[in-house]
C-alpha cells in the first residue's frame, strides 16, 4: 500500500468519525473558542512594542525620503509634456526601433488625452524613487546570499515568505511606522519589488560558468574585483530579468499603496472612482496604469535579451532634443493637461452603455450570477446539507438524502477498489464528504489529517509535520473559520482556472493559430495591475462573491494556460518519432505521450495559479468577500497590527502549504520520468 493510499484511508476514517460523533462530540466539528490562544494579541503587543522603538527612526527615514519623492514629483509635473514625450520616444527607439517607438507614441498620446497626465506623472515619480531603492536592497540581498553560502537557504525562505504574505498585511505596520502619506506607499512598493531582484541576482551569480570564475581567479583579481568586474557583468542578462520584474512589481503595487498613500496618483484615482461607482472614469484611469505597465515591460524586457537590438543612438538624442526644444518654445502656452481630456465623452459613453447593457440584460445577468452562486459556489462553501433549500433548489435537503449521497459514494468507491484502484476509491469518498459538508464547514481534525497526508505523499514526513504544525497555529489563533473561507474561494477559483486554462492551453498546443490569438491576451493580462481586474467585472456584476470569483480567475488563469501549452509542445523529438513509428494517432500521441511528459510543467503552472489566486484574494476583499482577506483589510483600516500580521501570516501559510505540496508532486513526477 502506497503512502498516498494510507493517507487517504486515514483521512476517510477521521472524516467518518467526525460525522458520526458530531452530536456527541461537537468539538470535533467546531474548534472550541475556549481552546483559542490570544496569539493575535500577543503578536500585536510584541510587534507594537518593537514598532514603538523603531518608529522615531522610521519617521526620520520618511522625512528623508520625502525629498526625492517631492523632487521627482515636481520635476515630472514641471517638465512640459513634449519634453517627457521626447524622452519616452527616445527610450522606445533605443530599445525596440520603430515598432517600440510607435507603441510609445500611441500609449503616451492616450495618457495625455485621458486627462490623467498629472496623476500619471505622480505615479511615475513613485516608481522612479521606489525602484532604485528596491534594486539596491534586492541586489544587496542577492550578493550577500551568494557570498555567504550558509545564508542562502534562510534568504530563500525569507523571500518565499515576502512573496506569499499578502501586500495588505505589511501595509498595517508600515502605516504605524511611517504614517499616512506617499512615503509609506513608496516603502511598500520597494519592499514588494525587492524579492524578484534578489532572486534573479542570486540565480544569475549561481549560473556563471565555472571556467569564467576560474579565469578571474587565475588573473589574480581580489574577491571584490572578481565579483564586480567579472561575475556581475557575466550575470547581467539574468540580473536584467530581475530589473524588469522589479519594475513591474513596483507598478503593480501603485494602486494598493494608494489605499494608505493619499497621493494624487493613478492608484488613488482608480480607487476613488471605483468606490464611487464611476466605472467609466475608473476604467480610463486603469487604462493609464495598463499603458505604463505595457511600455515599461516591453522596454525593460529588451534589456534582458542576450543579443540586444542596436539602434542608432543619434536618433534617440535627436528625439530628446526635439522634445526639449518644443517644450521650451511652448512653455506657458500648453495650458493645463487636465483640459486635454478628449476621452471624457468616451467615459460617459461607457457609463451610459454599461447602464443600458445591465438594464437590458438584467434578468439574464442576475440569473447567470444566481445560478453560479446557488448551484455551484454556495454548495461548495457550506455543503449540500445547508445550501439546498426550497428557495433555491425547490426542495429541502434531508438526512436521508445525506445517507443516499454517502451510499452512492460507497458504491462508486467499492467499484473502483474492486478494479484495483484503491486510492481513487478513497478519493471519491473524500470528495463526496466535502461536497456534503462544504469546505468552510470541514471538521478541523479531518482537515489537519488530510493536509498532512497530502504533504506526506508529496514531500515526505518533514513536510507533513511542518504543514500540520503551521495549520495548527491558525487553529490556535482563532482564525480557522476565516482560513477555510479563504481556502474555499481560492480553491474553487483555482479549480476553474485549471479546467478553463488547461483547455485553452491544450487548444493552443494543438492549434498554432489559437496560440497566436491567446498569446497577446495572456501578455496583456500579465501586465495589468491587480485592482484593474476588478473594474470591468464590477461594471457588470456589482459587488459580491461572484465578482471576486471572476476577478481571481481573470488574474490567475494565465500561468495555467502558458505552462500547459509549454509542457505539451516541449516533448522530446525521439519520443514523438517513437510514437509515430508505433502508429499512434495525433490524439493518442497527445494524451499518452505528450500529456504524461508535460505533467511536471503543468503542475508548476498549477502552483503559480494557486499563488496568483491567493495574491488576488485580499484585493477581492474590497468587493464583498469574507475570510482572511477581509480581516487583513479591516486591520488596515483600524491600524490593528496584530490582526493584520496574524491574518496575513495565516494566508501565507495556506499559500506556502499549497506551493510546497504541488512542488513536491511535480518533483516526484520529474523523478518518475527520469528528468
Image: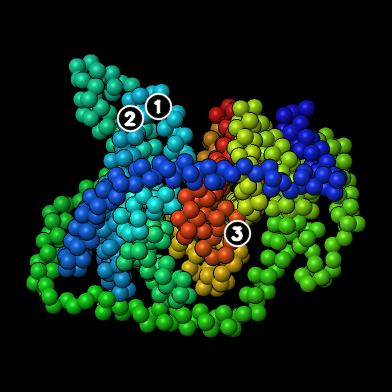
Q: State which quadrant residue 263 falls in.
A: bottom left
Q: Which mark is residue 340?
A: none
The spot of residue 366 in percent (x, y) is 65, 75
The spot of residue 221 in percent (x, y) is 20, 20
Query: Mark 1 falls on what kind of element?
Result: helix
The residue identified by callout 3 is 626
Mark nearer the viewer, 3 or 1: 3
499 and 550: which one is in front? 550
The spot of residue 409 in percent (x, y) is 84, 48
- Distance from label 3 to label 1 (Cα)? 38 Å
The spot of residue 71 in percent (x, y) is 19, 58
Sequence-earlier tag: 2 or 3: 2
Coloring scheme used: rainbow
Query: Mark 2 falls on what kind of element?
Result: helix
Q: State which quadrant residue 204 falls in.
A: top left
Tell me the quadrant of the picture where the N terminus can be found.
top right
- Please name the residue shown 48% across and 58% down the image: 638
- Distance from label 1 to label 2 (Cα)? 8 Å
- Please name the residue shown 46% across and 80% down the image: 351
The residue identified by callout 1 is 151
The residue identified by callout 2 is 144
- Please name the residue shown 38% across and 33% down the image: 203
| Contact flag, marks 1 and 2 (Cβ < 8 Å) | yes
Amino acid at each position: 500500500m502506497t503512502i498516498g493510499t494510507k493517507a487517504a484511508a486515514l483521512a476517510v476514517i477521521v472524516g467518518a468519525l467526525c460525522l458520526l460523533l458530531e452530536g456527541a462530540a461537537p468539538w470535533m466539528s467546531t474548534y472550541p473558542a475556549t481552546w483559542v490562544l490570544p496569539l493575535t494579541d500577543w503578536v500585536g503587543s510584541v510587534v507594537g512594542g518593537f514598532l514603538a522603538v523603531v518608529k522615531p527612526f522610521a519617521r526620520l527615514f520618511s522625512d528623508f525620503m520625502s525629498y526625492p519623492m517631492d523632487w521627482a514629483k515636481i520635476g515630472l509635473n514641471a517638465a512640459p509634456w513634449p519634453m517627457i514625450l521626447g524622452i519616452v520616444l527616445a527610450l522606445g527607439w533605443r530599445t525596440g526601433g520603430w515598432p517600440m517607438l510607435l507603441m510609445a507614441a500611441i500609449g503616451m498620446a492616450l495618457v495625455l488625452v485621458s486627462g490623467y497626465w498629472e496623476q500619471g506623472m505622480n505615479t511615475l515619480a513613485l516608481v522612479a524613487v521606489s525602484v532604485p531603492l528596491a534594486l539596491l536592497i534586492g541586489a544587496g540581498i542577492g550578493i550577500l546570499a551568494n557570498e555567504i553560502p550558509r545564508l542562502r537557504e534562510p534568504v530563500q525562505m525569507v523571500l518565499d515568505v515576502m512573496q506569499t504574505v499578502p501586500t495588505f498585511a505589511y501595509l498595517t505596520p508600515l502605516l504605524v511606522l511611517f504614517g499616512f502619506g506617499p512615503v509609506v506607499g513608496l516603502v511598500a512598493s520597494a519592499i514588494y519589488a525587492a524579492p524578484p531582484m534578489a532572486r534573479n541576482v542570486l540565480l544569475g551569480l549561481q549560473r556563471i560558468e565555472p571556467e569564467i570564475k576560474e579565469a578571474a581567479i587565475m588573473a589574480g583579481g581580489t574577491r571584490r574585483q572578481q565579483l564586480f568586474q567579472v561575475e556581475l557583468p557575466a550575470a547581467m542578462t539574468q540580473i536584467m530579468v530581475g530589473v524588469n520584474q522589479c519594475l513591474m512589481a513596483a507598478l503593480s503595487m501603485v494602486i494598493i499603496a494608494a489605499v494608505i498613500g493619499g497621493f494624487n496618483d493613478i492608484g488613488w484615482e482608480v480607487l476613488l472612482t471605483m468606490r464611487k461607482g464611476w466605472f467609466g472614469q475608473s476604467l480610463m484611469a486603469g487604462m493609464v496604469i495598463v499603458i505604463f505597465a505595457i511600455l515599461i515591460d516591453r522596454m525593460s524586457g529588451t534589456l534582458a535579451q542576450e543579443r540586444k537590438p542596436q539602434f542608432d543612438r543619434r536618433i534617440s538624442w535627436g528625439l530628446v532634443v526635439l522634445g526639449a526644444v518644443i517644450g521650451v518654445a511652448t512653455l506657458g502656452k500648453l495650458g493645463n493637461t487636465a483640459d486635454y481630456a478628449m476621452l471624457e465623452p468616451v467615459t460617459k459613453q461607457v457609463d451610459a452603455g454599461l447602464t443600458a447593457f445591465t438594464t437590458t440584460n438584467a434578468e439574464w445577468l442576475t440569473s447567470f450570477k444566481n445560478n453560479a452562486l446557488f448551484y455551484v459556489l454556495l454548495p461548495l462553501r457550506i455543503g449540500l446539507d445547508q445550501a439546498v433549500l426550497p428557495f433555491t433548489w425547490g426542495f429541502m435537503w434531508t438526512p436521508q438524502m445525506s445517507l443516499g449521497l454517502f451510499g452512492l459514494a460507497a458504491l462508486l468507491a467499492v467499484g473502483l477498489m474492486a478494479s484495483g484502484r484503491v486510492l481513487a476509491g478513497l478519493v471519491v469518498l473524500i470528495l463526496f464528504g466535502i461536497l456534503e459538508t462544504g469546505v468552510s464547514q470541514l471538521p478541523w481534525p479531518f482537515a489537519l489529517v488530510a493536509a498532512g497526508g497530502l504533504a506526506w505523499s508529496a514531500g515526505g514526513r518533514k513536510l507533513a509535520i511542518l504543514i500540520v504544525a503551521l495549520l495548527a497555529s491558525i487553529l490556535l489563533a482563532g482564525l480557522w473559520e476565516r482560513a477555510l473561507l479563504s481556502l474555499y474561494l481560492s480553491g474553487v477559483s483555482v479549480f476553474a482556472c485549471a479546467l478553463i486554462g488547461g483547455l485553452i492551453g491544450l487548444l493552443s498546443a494543438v492549434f498554432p493559430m489559437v496560440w497566436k490569438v491567446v498569446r497577446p491576451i495572456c501578455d496583456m493580462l500579465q501586465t495589468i495591475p491587480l485592482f484593474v481586474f476588478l473594474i470591468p467585472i464590477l461594471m457588470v456584476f456589482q459587488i459580491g462573491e461572484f465578482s471576486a470569483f471572476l476577478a481571481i480567475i481573470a488574474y490567475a488563469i494565465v500561468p495555467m494556460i502558458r505552462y500547459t501549452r509549454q509542457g505539451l509542445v516541449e516533448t522530446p523529438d525521439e519520443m514523438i518519432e517513437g510514437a509515430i513509428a508505433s502508429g499512434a494517432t495525433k490524439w493518442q500521441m497527445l494524451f499518452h505521450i505528450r500529456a504524461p511528459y508535460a505533467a511536471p510543467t503543468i503542475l508548476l503552472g498549477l502552483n503559480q495559479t494557486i499563488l496568483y489566486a491567493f495574491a488576488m484574494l485580499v484585493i477581492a476583499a474590497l468587493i464583498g468577500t469574507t475570510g482572511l482577506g477581509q480581516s487583513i483589510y479591516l486591520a488596515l483600516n483600524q491600524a490593528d497590527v496584530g490582526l493584520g500580521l496574524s491574518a496575513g501570516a495565516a494566508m501565507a501559510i495556506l499559500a506556502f502549504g499549497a506551493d510546497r505540496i504541488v512542488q513536491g508532486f511535480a518533483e516526484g513526477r520529474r523523478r518518475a520520468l527520469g528528468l
